[in-house]
Image (tube, helix red, strand yellow):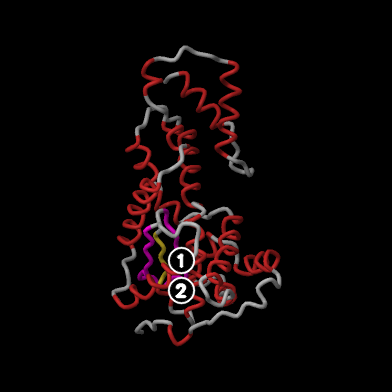
Amino acid sequence: MGIRYMVLLAALCGLSTAQGFDLKQDLKKKLEEAKQKVQPAETPSDAAAPSEAQALLADFSVDEEIKIGRQIAGNLLGASPLVPDEALQVYVNKVGRWVASQSERPDLAWHFGVIESADINAFAIPGGYVFLTRGLYQRLRNEAELAGVLAHEVAHVTRKHHLKILQKSKLLDIGAKALGRQAGEHDRLRNLIGSGAEVMARSLDKDAEYEADRMGVVLAGRAGYDPFGLPVVLQQVGQVKKDDTAVALLFKTHPHPDARLGQLDLAIGQRFDDLSGPTLESRLYRLRP
């Protein structure tokens, strides 16, 4: 193992996952501190390619993000396929793409779908893939509520919340397993994709969820819908009993809806009271029983 990898490993092991931190900045700081103490001669092999951790720290291009998302979406659909209702899928894509067009990433190739699952949940995947479950869709009462749910997930993608947790989780894995081999671009993407399914079932930072809620309300309102569609859905889901298996994963990976509503109230207050966009109840596509 080269001295550069030993220094990097020491830096990673010094990070605490129990405290909030900027992983990229902390890692750079610790590396600089270590370099001041040890200045080894760089071998040609060390200089030729970045370490795996250094590669994972790099920013992603849009193409890389889409490749990661496409594979993760394929894994998800392999376990829970789309509901076999073409009209439903077309409808959800129309609503989702209109909402996404109001975001800061309107040119991303957005894809939306409803998957076969009785759970009450929705998922955002890097690269513009958004899915909600049949169980959640069947609880929606109008198009504004659908738009609010999709807007929340669109916000996760635009803010790259899941990409960030993928990077952090893989960096911590590298430190824990003392990996010191060099990695190219293919390894970088493969490693992130490999942990994608696991990350989709893990919690995001609660602040990321609160941010997506705030942005979801704004995006839905900007798209012309009643901005309170998402809060209404949160109220409904919050009334489901905690021991109901349909919300087991949702409640495990998200703050409770009551906490999310409280944060929305603190952030927005009465600023949206004068906005009363349409709910479009009659336009909501009704799933066959």
* Residue lying at the far bottom of the rendered structure: 282
The image shows residue 264, relative to residue 27, as above or below, that is below
Identify the residue position indicated by label 2 in the image: 136
Whether residue 264 sits left or right of residue 193 in the image: it is right
The image shows residue 35, relative to residue 195, as above or below, that is above
Q: Are marks 1 and 2 in contact (CB under 8 Å)?
A: yes
Of residues 44 and 17, the one nearer the viewer is 44
Instruction: Give the amino acid at mark 1.
Output: Ala
Q: Which dot marks residue 122? A: 1
Q: Position of residue 54 (x, y in %)?
A: 46, 32
Question: Within 10 angstroms of label 2, few (less than 14), some, or many (20 or more) residues?
Answer: many
Q: Position of residue 205 (x, y in %)?
A: 57, 53
The image shows residue 39, relative to residue 104, as above or below, that is above
Q: Position of residue 183 (x, y in %)?
A: 36, 31
SS class, disc 1: strand
- Picture residue at 60% right of the left edge, 68% below the top: 257
Q: Quadrant of the C terminus?
A: bottom left
Tell me which segment is drawn in magenta: 109-126
SS class, disc 2: helix
Q: Position of residue 241 (x, y in %)?
A: 56, 74
Q: CA distance from mark 1 to mark 2?
A: 8 Å
Instruction: Give the amino acid at mark 2.
Output: Leu
The answer to which quarter of the image holds residue 25 is: top right
Of residues 254 and 103, the one nearer the viewer is 103
- Picture residue at 44% right of the left edge, 55% below the top: 200
Question: Within 10 angstroms of label 1, few (less than 14), some, or many (20 or more) residues?
Answer: many
